[in-house]
Image (spheres, rainbow, N blue to C red):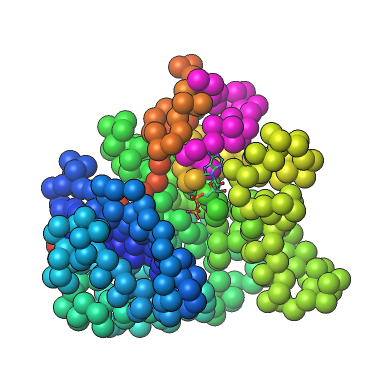
Amino acid sequence: MNVLVLNCGSSTLKFQLIWTTLDAMKSGEDKCLARGCIERLGGESVITLEPAASPPRKTSEPLHDIRGALEFIVRWLASEESGVDSVRNLTGIHAVGHRVVHGGERFVRSTLLTPEVVRHIEDLTDLAPLHNPANVKGIRAVEALLGKDIPQVAVFDTAFHQSLPEKSFLYAIPYQYYRRYALRRYGFHGTSHRYVAYRYRQLLGLPKEQTNIITLHLGNGCSACAIQAGVSIDVSMGLTPLEGLVMGTRSGDIDPAIAHYIAAKEGLDAHQVESVLNKQSGLLGVSGLTHDMRELLAEIDDTNDRRANLAVDIFCYRVRKYIGAYLAAMGGADAVVFTGGIGQNSARIRAKVCEGLSWMGLSLDAEKNENCILGQEGPVHTSGSRLKAYVIPTDEELLIARDTVRCVQGEIQ
Ligand code: ADP
């Protein structure tokens, strides 16, 4: 089955065409046929196209909205340039899988889309005002372009965390806010944490029930997840993706009173303060230089800039605190697993996160750690380390494609 995987944001659309079947996903033979990314929707869009067998190409074109972007994608997939021989017209796309950010408490697994399901996703707009409307636009654009009969599946960022017990998803605020507004911790990056946990137990030949790990998704957005017996029991992101670890531009945990304080001192309204915490904080806010970890590390090498060092220190310290907290919450774990752009590629950050943790049984093998970059996966701990450490590159799109096929074929209901 050729599955078009769509990640529709307010101004960006990422896509992959993935071939998979129930058998292929078991043997790991499923594969990405082509991928790409459209940025700056609404103006002169910047388009990156990556055919499977040839180098990426960048181009630009005015694309007004998600519908226009989707038309462009389908035209490109059907063209010679994409190199996808099995898609020469619209019937070569057999199903569409959407990354949907918020599934609230209703969606506990990936779900085949019906008009009723789409309505429920729209109803959750209050909880994800930037994301869910873009996801719904993507769903409607597919319907308009590929017809009502093409199966579409929603794979939710929040679904994996619906197993959280009340003690970890409830905030200690008046209970009626949970009843009235569903104010609680939802957690995000669920597809990534779930994929990494799945891949970990595949690598070690473990059943789900014996998967006791802490997964660390460190990218532009960052989150930690405590996975016990294969299910998520705690996660660092909360009602929104703002809580928890320090991220590229997000603060992560702060004293909630800070919001009011900044508002009063700077003359900002609540919306503006939220924007400061989401877009001007984290690595960017502390360093005053960049949100990009690679650039920060280069700056440290070049100039040993004090605030760049401070940003990286705070970032790693926060991750380490979460590892400690989750080990306590879980009563111990077997491994810590690094993923995401930073987690997969930066041996230096992994080493800094794990610094001083040998007392609790975690020690990294310097050579293995240095060598595990650029998409490699495997263990990075020393042979005597009681708590193991792994690097496992995430692949959310692959999981979305697999879930799409499993929903279409009735394996997930
Ligand atoms: P997103 O969360 O948007 O999917 P990624 O998972 O691609 O983003 O992560 C992006 C982050 O990964 C950026 O901060 C980038 O600098 C960082 N990164 C990528 N490669 C490296 C590297 N070799 N060393 C350090 N940081 C890296």
Tell me which residue sits at (15%, 53%) in the image.
21
Tell me which residue sits at (27%, 66%) in the image.
76
Residue 79 sits in quarter = bottom left
Name of the residue lying farthest toward the top: 384
Main SS class of the magenta portion in the image: helix
Q: Tell whether position 348 is magenta.
A: yes
Percent of width and height locating residue 404:
24, 62
Left or right side of 147 for 54: right
Judge whether 33 appears above or below 181 on screen: above
56 or 365: nearer the viewer: 56
Percent of width and height locating residue 311:
71, 45
| Residue 16 visible | yes
Name of the residue lying farthest toward the right: 265
Q: What is the quadrant of the N terminus in the image?
A: bottom left
Q: Tell whether position 226 is magenta.
A: no
Segment colored magenta: 342-367
| Residue 386 visible | no
Judge whether 221 appears above or below 68 on screen: above
